[in-house]
Image (spheres, grey):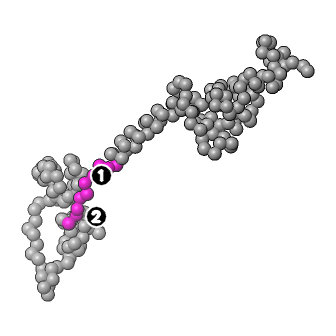
Amino acid sequence: MKKVKYRCPTCKAVQNVEYSPIMSRTLECHKCGARFVVGPSKPTPEVDWKGGFQRSLVPCEDCCRDISSRADRCPHCGAPTPNTKVKPPKKWRQTAQVALIAAAIPVFIGFGFIHIITGSNLSVPDVVKKDTFGYTETFINIDEITGMPWLFAKSTHPIGCKVLQEKGYIESNESFMQRVGVDLGNNTLAKSFTHR
């Protein structure tokens, strides 16, 4: 095997390649990724003119089979021809990813500053500013909280109940206790209900 220098036709980078006539002569540029054919330089075949037209079939440099002179790649072995156009790598994908991440970060952080109240009696969700930053109970469903017993709702959704009371969607603690008839002076729940 001989070590030979080749120049990439796209980016003009010089490459050191170990060349063997047994191996495939199609290489990929280490710098730009373009594929090109290497090998000992062959004399350019004379153009065969038949009846005023250029010869339409030329031999492939890899498999030596006849291919179209306008072919982009050999249909037999897939090797690129001198007509092969190399597309540069697309940079818009990386730019789009960075832009998407840059747009998603403020949205994600913004959810830490608001509550979104939904429910069957609201046609449009209500957005309320949080007292402190956090992600607990960002989405509050009125139907879920009002569909469970009051004490259980207060213990499982304390922030949601407080926000709904402040906005007037559900009754306050005092009005609930007054309506149910609970004595707040007793320590236990069983003793707090007055018998009427």
Mark 2 or mark 1: whose residue is earlier in sequence = 2
Does 27 sit above or below residue 116? Answer: below
- Separation of disc 2 and disc 1 at Cα? 23 Å
Q: Is residue 115 magenta?
A: no
Res 66 visible: no
Residue 155 placement (x, y as % from top left) = 69, 24
Q: Amino acid at mark 2?
A: Gly
Q: Is residue 151 above or below residue 141?
A: above
Asked if residue 86 lies in the magenta stretch, the reply is yes
Q: Secondary structure at mark 2?
A: loop
Q: Which mark is residue 90?
A: 1
Relative to 119, does residue 83 appear above or below in the rendering? Answer: below
Disc 1 secondary structure class: loop
Decide which of 189, 60 is in the foreground and name it.
189
Say which residue appears at 25% left-offset and 57% top-offset. Answer: 87
Looking at the image, residue 13 sits to the left or right of residue 112; the answer is left
Instruction: Give the prevailing secondary structure in the magenta stretch.
Output: loop
Residue named by callout 2: 78
Quarter of the picture containing the C terminus is top right
Question: Closer to the camera, 175 or 115?
Answer: 175
Q: Nearer the viewer, residue 141 or 69?
A: 141
- 67 horizontally vs 45: left or right: right
Residue at 43% across / 36% down in the picture? 105
Choose top left, top right, bottom left or bottom right for residue 189. Answer: top right
| Label 2: how many Cα within 10 Å (few below 14, some 14–19, many 20+) | few
User: Which amino acid, by three-letter code, is at mark 1?
Assistant: Lys
First to last magenta residue range:
83-93
- The answer to whether residue 56 shows anywhere in this view is yes
Q: Residue furthest right?
A: 196
